[in-house]
Amino acid sequence: MSRPALAETNTPTHPPPDLPRGRGAIPRLADADAFTSAAKSHAVREAIGERAPLLADVEANPLTYYTNGDATHARGGSGKRGAVWTALSRGAGPLATDAAKALPAVVLGTLLNILDGISYGMIIFPAAGVFADLGGSGVSMFFVSAIISQLVYSAGASGFAGANGSMMIEVVPFFHLIANSIQDRIGEDDPQAVIATTMAAFAFSSILTGMTFFLLGALKLGTLIGFFPRHILVGCIGGVGVFLIITGLTVSTRMSDDDFSLSLETLKFFILNVHNLALWVPAFGLAALLRIITHRWDHQLIFPIYFCIIPAVFYVVVAAARIDLSDLRHSGWLFDMGASSEPWYHFYALFDFRKMHWSAFWETMPTQLALLFFNILHPPLNVPALAVSLNHDVDTDKELLAHGYSNVLAGILGTVPNYLVYVNTLLFYRVGGDTRVSGFMLAGATAVLLMVGTGPIAFIPVMVVGALIFVLGIDLVKEALWDTRQRVSTTEYITIASIMVVMTVWDFVIGVLFGIVASCIFFVVQSSQRQSIRALYSGSTVLSTVRRPGAHRAFLGAVSRQTAVLRLQGFLFFGTIARVEDSISALLRDDAWRREPLRFLVLDLALVAGVDMSAAEALLRVHRLLAQRGVVLVLCGVTDGEVGRALANVGLLDAPGVELFTTFSDAVEWTENVYLRAWFEAQKTETLPVTLPGRQDGGTPFQGSVGDSPRRSALLNAGWETIARDHSPENMAPEPLNTLISVFSPYEVIDADALAPLVPYLTRMSVPAGTVLWEQGASPDGLYIVEAGVLRATYAFAPPTLPMEESMVPGTVAGELSTLSRLERNATCVVERPAILWKLSIENLERLERDEADLARAFTRLILKGAKLDYDILITALATRQ
């Protein structure tokens, strides 16, 4: 029986075990997402043809199926020549062998189609009104759709050689909605118009479904369907389960769909009426008994054998009691087919476009779209699930194209939508139906059933069909409410149950819309509870990747407390931006401001996926709030993408007092340069100018600050306690001693006379901009002490880690670790601005170690102290840059 795509079980792996819980079990919804990636693991097979197996597949499963084409034992032939031509070219002998091997599978597949045709086909149309006698036509339509899909798949459209196609059970409640709405719109006084319009609507649903499948497959968008919230689909499937249970009650008791309502009168009809109770309780009991049996014993043949035994036992009892069949038919134990003598193609006589009511047809479009929603979600889940269960390589987009062909053809031929059935196909393979020959044989056997007609249905006990429908309904309700209780969140579970209630009490289309709206609301609520603030810390805890003299670093460590760093993540929208706004406002409150006034707020948006209008306007409000306090907003991680456009649309990027940078390191480097420049400009002639890397601004945002401002005072005090000691003219020494003192004085008390013997070992170099001092991986030639200019080193890492850059300004050392260790360079260093360097070559270093051993050891110790701090900062920047 072709169960809906999302029923519950433990999905088989490699090789798949017996199908759990009998035939009614299909793959878990929670496992569906994993199937897609697993099904694409053998791309090599595409290059060597569908019939060529991978060695790992042959070793793991030598006696089953080999590829997407015909599952045979190492036979030759190319899958690219077409499945039919390949089969014919092998000759009559191999064909006869495959046909004989496939007989058990064909018998099983035919039996499954009989059960599906009776249970599904009999309820395609409502059982009342003008549709009361169309059960036989529904069965014929089922078989036609199954034959069409079977032929399309077996002819090579599907990658599964033994694919089984059948009608979708989920379309039934929507078909009832369509039929009833057309009947209500036209009225029962014109039954021919009602039926003609309904038949056209059913066929149109197949064409609409097929065109959508074809479009998804042609555009290779099959994986996008997997992004739809699964709990909404589970709720809808559960709603279908409730509908099937109700249908089982109405079919068993011959109650009209229009007469059914959730009322006390309906309850009395089923419970207090002894005759009705005797009709539906056996069917329900048989369904429950089957589930008990399949829970205890696990074999794929239990399901079909069980439903073969029921009519046999029924007729044994009837014969023993000598009950007249006409009396049983009259009392509701057998189907009263009425027009059972009509041929299978009778349903084509129901099409009459001259009598169609087009306004009623177009009014069914909302229901058609809801039906389409169900139809398109199943194959992208079923196909990868089946690929994993059968250890097959499969192309989901190719399968979508196959579904497109089969459904468009079904619509043109006037029948209902179809799809590849997971359970039927899995069982078909396990009993030998792993070739395309077996697929064609199943299509032929189903065609024989179609030619026989619907007459035999009059001898099938109603309890058999009722039990089949009850089994489906119970399974789907169980999967929606019981199996998900520990696999979904509370809000998702509430959504599932609510969808089922809405579908049952009101309408299926309303239930689908309710599920989408409820999911959106819960998504907003849950997303608003997620933390958009990844980190919030003071600027003194993170420095830029610029090698600065120790005095400068000490100054920045003190003054950067006036910088606040806020790193954001995720999607910023009206539900998450409020917390961001509150956190920034807290930094500007009077109590926080008195403890630590701010000069810069660095807002890192590198991990922000998007910004909606509400969030962008909130950031604009934040900027206005910062401007009132004289705080500069520094934005980094903003590109020309969605985030940049959203902020530009509200005018934030062009607002005064907003600075924009590509990377976080560039933004922090700029704030450090501003602090340094502000201090040096404030000293005028008392100190010498300083060389700064990065963006060169003509002024600072400090202009206009009063002298007794807490921020200004803190900056000046920090500068006098650190930088002023090294930059005072009276402390100057001749070069390169002055640079050496600037480099090493933060670590020890440096005596210029003690370093003077080092000068003969250094070589002065004047290097123009653009010169490459060394490349990453090269052997070291020496270390360089920077007297003037700026160097920039680029560290390249293994992909996908992005490179990192580090600037070196006057008063720093470059290339020291590779020189001391005699190991290859770990970066490429380029002169960014014309530089004056003092080089200690490898040869001079070795001579220094021989001639001045004590000085060499002291110099090495100082170098390592500075290198340790430099690399700590570099590693911290690398670890925190995202």
Image (spheres, helix red, strand yellow):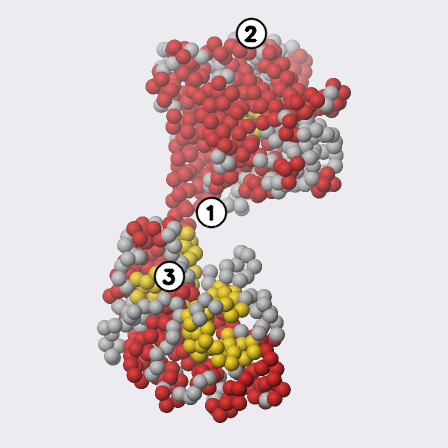
Residue 414: horizontal and vertical position, in percent? 49, 17
First in sequence: mark 3 vs mark 2: 2
Which residue is depicted at the point 64% across and 17% down? 444
Which residue is under mark 2? Answer: 341
Residue 812: horizontal and vertical position, in percent? 47, 77
Tell me the kind of residue under disc 2: Ser
Which residue is depicted at the point 46% across and 23% down? 207
Q: Is residue 307 toward the left or the right of residue 359 in the image?
A: right
Depth order, front residue of 728/71 = 728
Q: Which of labels 3 and 2 is toward the front?
A: 3
Q: Is residue 443 above or below residue 876?
A: above
Which residue is under mark 3? Answer: 661
Dot 1 alpha-carbon crowd within 10 angstroms: few under 14, some 14 to 19, many 20 or more: few
First in sequence: mark 3 vs mark 1: 1
Label 1, secondary structure: give it: helix
Which residue is depicted at the point 40% across and 41% down? 518
Tell me the kind of residue under disc 3: Phe
Q: Is residue 398 above or below residue 355?
A: below
Q: Is residue 324 above or below residue 530?
A: above
Depth order, front residue of 120/548 = 548
Which residue is under mark 1? Answer: 490
Dot 3 alpha-carbon crowd within 10 angstroms: few under 14, some 14 to 19, many 20 or more: some
Label 3, secondary structure: give it: strand
Label 2, secondary structure: give it: loop
Tell me the kind of residue under disc 1: Thr
